[in-house]
Image: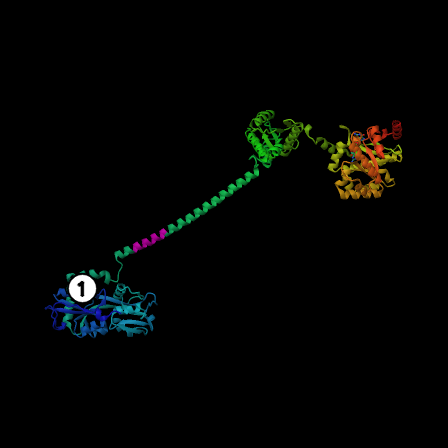
Amino acid sequence: MVSRTGLTSVVLFAVTLGCAGANAQASETGTIRYAGSQYYPPLESLNNQGQAEGYISDLVRAMAASTGDSVEFTLQSWHAAQQSVLSQDADVIALIASNARSELYDFTTPFYYVAHSIFSHRSGPQFGSLEQLENQRVAFVRDSFAYGEIDTLPVPVNAIIVEHELTCLQLVANQEADACIEVTITSNHLAQIYRLPVQVTSPPFWPQAYVFAVRKGNTTLLDRLNTQLANIVVDGSYRDVYQKWASEIESKPHSTWDHLQYVIWLFVAIALLAVIFILWSWSLRQRVNERTRALSQELKKSQQLQERLSYTAAHDSATGLFNRTSFFEKLEERLQQTPHAATNDFTVITLSVVNVERIGITLGYITSLRTIKAVARILETIPDSVVAHFGSGLFGMIYGGAAPVEALVKDLEERQLADANGIEPQLAFGVSSYPSRTTVNLDANELIRRAMTGLAHARKKNIALGSYSPDIEPDSLNLRLLNDFQRVQCSQFVLHYQPQLDLRTNTITHVEALIRWHHPELGLLQPLKFIPIFEESGVIGKITRWVIAEAIAMLKRHNTDLQVSVNVTTRDLVDEDFLPFLQHKLQDFDTSRIVLEVTETGIFEDSGQAQHCIKALRQLGVQVAVDDFGTGYSSLSYLNDLAIQEVKIDRSFIAALKKKQRAQTIVRSTIALAKELGLDVVAEGVEDLETLQLVQALGADRIQGYYLAKPTAEDALDLSQLVRDHLDTLQ
Ligand code: C2E
Ligand code: CA
Ligand code: CA
């Protein structure tokens, strides 16, 4: 709180009237003593030098000057100021006109208007109306207009009475009072000047006229003052004073400047908003751009990946040429573009670096790869061609060039030699022309197959270029025989029989049935030409059954004790219908007259089922012989377990007997062991007497071979004549 005594000061004019202001005459000049509040800016207040200043003070000075009077100011507390007028220590006071005050004072015409407001702490409760002040601590200035109105307030309040307007506000600022009711304009100024955290929180109320007041009855002074007021309006000094203070005393109507300011602020706000919007949209655009960039990068990456993947899928990694899959596709495309009748022929070429494997083995994998790449680079340069690497030095080419293939091959071979860095790749070419004379199934697959056939032919014949023709088909005969068999079945087969001589009795006891095919176009075909392919293609079962049936029929026709050996394959043994078939065939027949020959290797090829069948055959009474014994390195004792009765020593050992000691040893020990196991031993392929004598000496039971007889047709087979001839030879 500000000390009252410290701030109270008195402004003295040089001339002081010795009597009361009430005695002053309009015609006389004198000093008018003016009282007021020291804290009432901008209306009146003491400045730093202790002088009165403000709108009222200036007005009073102008008024006094208009009548030649002087003026003396005493600015102090509001209560003291009023008291000084009432006690005639001062003459005039400017105040708010009110009924209560009109009891004590006489008023001039109003020269100004004020209103009141509630002032609250900025961060405290904000009182917006008088009603809200109920029971609040409300500060008032002693003897103020507001205090005078306290009984008219709509609600009771806890009034705090202070001397100065400033104190009122300070109480609120210090939160010792909740609010104060004060003249709006002056208290706003005070709060601003003293930087108090106090603000107007209500609309203005109590609009009242502001007047100069003199003690009741001092009409002379009152008239003089009214005259002065009239004077200054007329002489323009009122306007000057007003203009001087206008900016502070006016309740700020919207001036042009204000409008301008408002417009400026509006503009600034709009500009700010625009800037914010621009920044926001810019950042949005940036973000969108970034995202778009990221997306397009991702898209680009995935496109690149896609391209890489499809490139990898279509190309050979070693050479960068197309791979086999794309080569097939390219060829199919080409075929679709080129109908069969078209004249613009092309050629499918396959090319192999024949010695790539040898280069790999001797010089290393990298070198072989380099050789393949070098070949690839040269092939790439061939005009009008599509080249692919199938892998391992095998290339494919669709050649549509004008030069004949032979010339191209020659050229390639020469360039190859020139480019080879000392390593000479050996090239072989296979060619398949399109359209071909035979236009069956000429798809990409067939064309490439034909080129491969040409290549295989070239390699087999050790020539550079193999052109496809049906004649070089390795399997053409096989295919034809299979087709023919499907058509004619077993009708063109015949059995030839090759006798076996029993060396102990010098009698022909056995014959082996050996099949032949009387082919109408190909002549008499030996079994090795067709048996293996029939075995492979699974039709052997039909043939075996035909042979067995035919052999049994033969035995029945001759009505002798002869035994017949029939060759069966492993496929027959594992066929579950085979045993029932035999059982059926051998009904009412001496089963022991049938010997089934199974090759040594065949027995062990499919151990389980085949061996099971051999045992079952034995139970049926059928004899089982091991054919080609010695080629499969199996042990005899093991064969014994299978209930086999006969061993046929392979003719390769028999043929070698005369020359090779080792063959003799093998045959000797085989026969010896077989004897021990109680097996019959047949020596196959005996071609001369010397061999016959040798095997006889070694203990073989029977012989079979050209020396005795070649396989012959049934009608040419004269067994008794054979024996006779044989006996003659032996003697
Ligand atoms: P294999 O069972 O070893 O038959 C003996 C083969 O040796 C016969 O050949 C016969 O003509 C030949 N041969 C006999 N003695 C001599 C000789 O002193 N010197 C020479 N160099 N060869 C002699 P073939 O008839 O050509 O039969 C070959 C093979 O075909 C047979 O060998 C047999 O494995 C098979 N085979 C023959 N006919 C049939 C059959 O009906 N069914 C089955 N599955 N295979 C059969
Ligand atoms: Ca045989
Ligand atoms: Ca044999």
Q: Nearer the viewer, residue 724 or 350?
A: 724
Q: Quadrant of the N terminus?
A: bottom left
Above or below — where is 251 with respect to 422? below
Q: Looking at the picture, how far across and down is residue 633, in whole percent?
A: 76, 38
Above or below — where is 125 with respect to 660? below
Q: Amino acid at mark 1?
A: Asp
Q: Is residue 207 left or right of residue 507?
A: left
Q: Is residue 262 left or right of residue 646?
A: left
Residue 619, by quadrant, is: top right
The answer to whether residue 398 is visible is yes
Which SS does the magenta portion mostly show? helix
Give the magenta part as a residue range: 262-275
Q: Looking at the picture, how far across and down is residue 192, in whole percent?
A: 27, 63
Q: Looking at the picture, how far across and down is residue 298, in whole percent?
A: 49, 45
Q: Nearer the viewer, residue 438 or 139?
A: 139
Identify the residue at the far left of this view: 28
Residue 678 magenta-drawn? no
State the residue at coordinates (57%, 31%). 375
Can you identify the residue that label 1 sits on?
A: 58
Above or below — where is 148 with respect to 502? below
